[in-house]
Image (cartoon, rainbow, N blue to C red):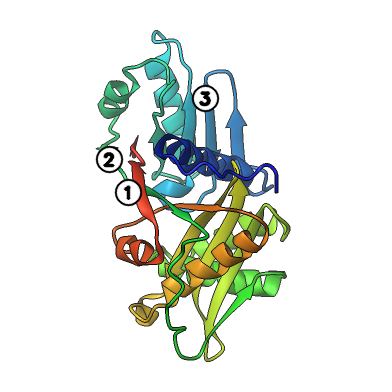
Amino acid sequence: MSNTLKDLSGPALVAAIKANLFEWYRYLGRSPKAEFFDGPELTWLLTGVQNSFCNAVLRTQANPDKLDAIIEETLAHFKSRGVTRLSWWTEPGTQPADLGKHLVAHGLTYTDGGPGMAADLLALNEDLATPSGLTIERVRDTETLHKWAYASIVGFEMPETDVKIWFDLFTGLGFDLPLRNYIGIVNGEPVAASELFLAAGVAGIYVVATIPEARRQGIGAALTLAPLREARAMGYRIGILQSSPMGLEVYRRLGFQEYCRMNHYY
């Protein structure tokens, strides 16, 4: 594909890691079940799931004189929707430059986040044994999507009440590219989930989760490899993701390297 990224230099990969993430947020905002706002001063996404990564302020271009009022109004709006967990991104180009100081004053906390990682899809370590009894399916219908929503919510150890919110969000996006979901099944039961999102010329991996009782068996690695192989077959050269501490060594074994930190306030 002519629009896929082939540049493996550090600066190009950092830009792609972050661009893919922000396009992923915007794509989720297309769901009728999401609330997405894109105004002159702010861009934000509200999904309703009680996870700070799933509700985010993506862009801030505010007049310093109005900033505190904007922050207060935005936090109040999220709270009015029952959401008290969110991320506030402060990428280069954010205005004003001292936004972080104001966010801290309003009760947010800075984190250097997890590592932003990338891998050459032609150099993946695929010499990994498939866990016994595991089958991986691409989600193509609402019945399988509900199982995927269950596996991902339970895998992230979020309240099971969020399963319906997560399911409704992705039902509204359909089953076509640029987004595909994958589910891991053992003995007929959903145990793991992952997601592929194609944007910014790279293959983004999201929502890699394994339910607690099925961990440490290589299932997460298998659910990461499956979408990467599909992306490679479509002509993509680079895979990207943001890692949690739990998944870091798994991704390194697959061939991912850290290129940046996903700094934000939460």
Residue name at image x 27 percent, y 22 percent: 101
Mark before the other along the chain sequence, 2 or 3: 3
Q: Is 258 situated left or right of 180 in this image?
A: left
Residue name at image x 47 percent, y 74 percent: 222
Residue name at image x 52 percent, y 59 percent: 121
Separation of marks 2 and 3 at Cα, in angstroms? 21 Å
Q: Secondary structure at mark 3?
A: strand
**Residue type indicated by callout 1:** Gly
**Residue type indicated by callout 2:** Thr
Q: Is 69 situated left or right of 233 in this image?
A: left
Mark before the other along the chain sequence, 1 or 3: 3
Residue name at image x 72 percent, y 58 percent: 174
Q: Which residue is mark 3?
A: 42
Q: Secondary structure at mark 1?
A: loop
Q: Which mark is residue 114?
A: 1
Q: Which residue is mark 2?
A: 111
Separation of marks 1 and 2 at Cα, in angstroms? 9 Å
Tell which of 178 and 104 is nearer to you: 178
Tell which of 36 and 23 is nearer to you: 23
Circle 2 residues within 10 Å: few <14, some 14–19, many ≥20: few
Circle 3 residues within 10 Å: few <14, some 14–19, many ≥20: some
The reply to whether residue 168 is in sight is no
Counting from the top left corner in percent of width and height, residue 76 is at 44, 32
